[in-house]
Amino acid sequence: MRYAVDPKPGSDFYRWRLVAINGRTVAVSKEWFYSQGSARTAAMRFKSRCRTWNYEVYGDLKGIYRWRAKSSENQIIALCNGTFSSQFSARNAASDVRDNGGTADGP
């Protein structure tokens, strides 16, 4: 895995994302940042604390599941970058980010 910081198309905002070895984005920052440096700092914070965040899996009425990472203050820090057809799959994906995000390359 590796971290990347990218601009929002057509704006001056930035967001970090966590990219799997296959090139697929598996997590993104909850918020957009005013500078590339701020987004990079937030990615480094996530990287250093991702094992301590709370990962919440939630679903909708159509049976689509997602996960989000929350700080100890219950603030949403990161989101999955996709959907899952089962709670089990979403939980496994969140666990993968929790277990491997701290050793990912970058930002």
Image (spheres, rainbow, N blue to C red):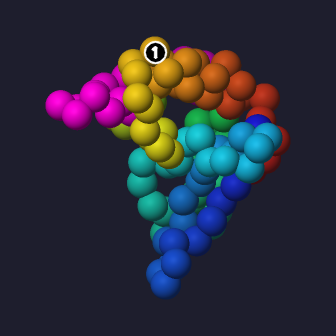
- Which residue of the protein is positioned furthest toward the bottom in this rendering? 10
The correct choice, above or below, for 46 with respect to 39 in the image is above
Number of callouts: 1
The residue at which mark 1 appears reads as 88
Q: Nearer the viewer, residue 56 or 25?
A: 25
Q: Quadrant of residue 66?
A: top left
Tell me where residue 73 appears, x and y as whole percent.
34, 26
Q: Residues within 10 Å of mark 1 (few under 14, many from 20)?
A: few
At 65% from the left edge and 54% from the top edge, which residue is drawn?
40
As for residue 34 lying within the magenta part, the answer is no
Q: Nearer the viewer, residue 98 or 74?
A: 98
Q: Mark 1: which secondary structure?
A: helix
**In this rendering, position of residue 56 left or right of residue 106:** left
Tell me where residue 48 appears, x and y as whole percent.
66, 30
At 62% from the left edge and 48% from the top edge, which residue is drawn?
25
Could one spot residue 74 in this view of the protein? Answer: no
The correct choice, above or below, for 78 with respect to 98 in the image is below
Tell me where residue 99 appears, x and y as whole percent.
67, 19
Considering the image in quadrants, where does the N terminus appear?
A: top right
Q: Quadrant of residue 62?
A: top left
Kind of residue indicated by mark 1:
Phe
At 42% from the left edge and 48% from the top edge, which residue is drawn?
30
At 56% from the left edge and 26% from the top edge, which residue is drawn?
93
As for residue 58 lying within the magenta part, the answer is yes
**In this rendering, position of residue 103 left or right of residue 68:** right
Region rendered in magenta: 48-66
Could one spot residue 47 in this view of the protein? Answer: yes
Q: Nearer the viewer, residue 98 or 64?
A: 64
